[in-house]
Amino acid sequence: RRVAREICVKMGTYFQVQDDYLDCYASPEVLGKIGTDIQDSKCSWLVVQALKRASPEQRNVLLQNYGKDDEACIAKVKEVFTALELEKAYFAYEDGVHAELVRTIDRDVHTVPKEVFHGLLRKIYKRSK
């Protein structure tokens, strides 16, 4: 039961991080909506990572532009995200959490069929919308 809970929490966190990434980087045609996390000042995984990695100058750009519903401000935030290679960081996170989940499922799940968790993971791994 504890293992199932840990897997579900980790999968849920991964799903939310993925949602944050897609909000910024997926095309509206694929995503089915226009991402608004930046202008809505959401505490997304991307901005948290950016603030952890930013130089003082980049932090200032984020503080001055994040949360503003203005195309120029949004572009400046995305420029900082690009300079900090957050897409690369996201893909590293995604691959790492996927590998960790697969290991945990294969090693520690004994009370329910492993396929229940593997099936859920397949549905979200590398999703585009």
Image (cartoon, grey):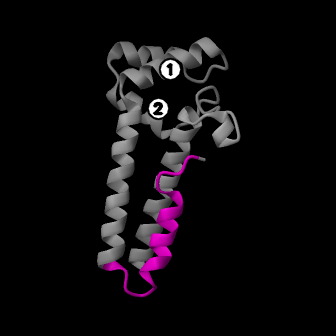
Which of the 4 image quadrants contains residue 56? top left
Mark 1 surroundings: few (<14), some (14-19) or many (≥20) residues within 10 A: many
Q: Please provide the residue range marked out in magenta.
A: 108-128
- Above or below, 128 against 7 in this view is above
Q: Residue furthest bottom?
A: 111
Q: Position of residue 29 (x, y in %)?
A: 68, 36
Counting labels gives 2
Residue at 32 percent of width and 60 percent of height: 99
**On the rendered structure, is 90 left or right of 76?**
left
The residue wearing badge 1 is 77
Q: Amino acid at mark 1?
A: Val
Q: Residue furthest right?
A: 33
Of labels 1 and 2, earlier in sequence is 2
**On the rendered structure, is 68 left or right of 43?**
right
The residue wearing badge 2 is 47
Give the alpha-carbon distance from disc 1 to disc 2, as whole Å.
9 Å
Is 3 in front, or is 79? 79
Residue at 37 percent of width and 58 percent of height: 98
User: Are the residues at dot 1 and dot 2 in contact (C-beta closer than 8 Å)?
Assistant: yes
- Above or below, 52 against 3 in this view is above
- SS of the residue at dot 2? helix
Q: Position of residue 110 (x, y in %)?
A: 37, 86
- SS of the residue at dot 1? helix
Residue at 39 percent of width and 32 percent of height: 86
Q: Position of residue 127 (x, y in %)?
A: 53, 51
Q: Position of residue 6 (x, y in %)?
A: 41, 68
**On the rendered structure, is 122 left or right of 27?**
left
Which of the 4 image quadrants contains residue 50? top left
User: Which quadrant: the N terminus?
Assistant: bottom left
Say which mark, if any, is on residue 94. Answer: none
State yes or no: residue 112 in magenta.
yes
Q: Amino acid at mark 2?
A: Val
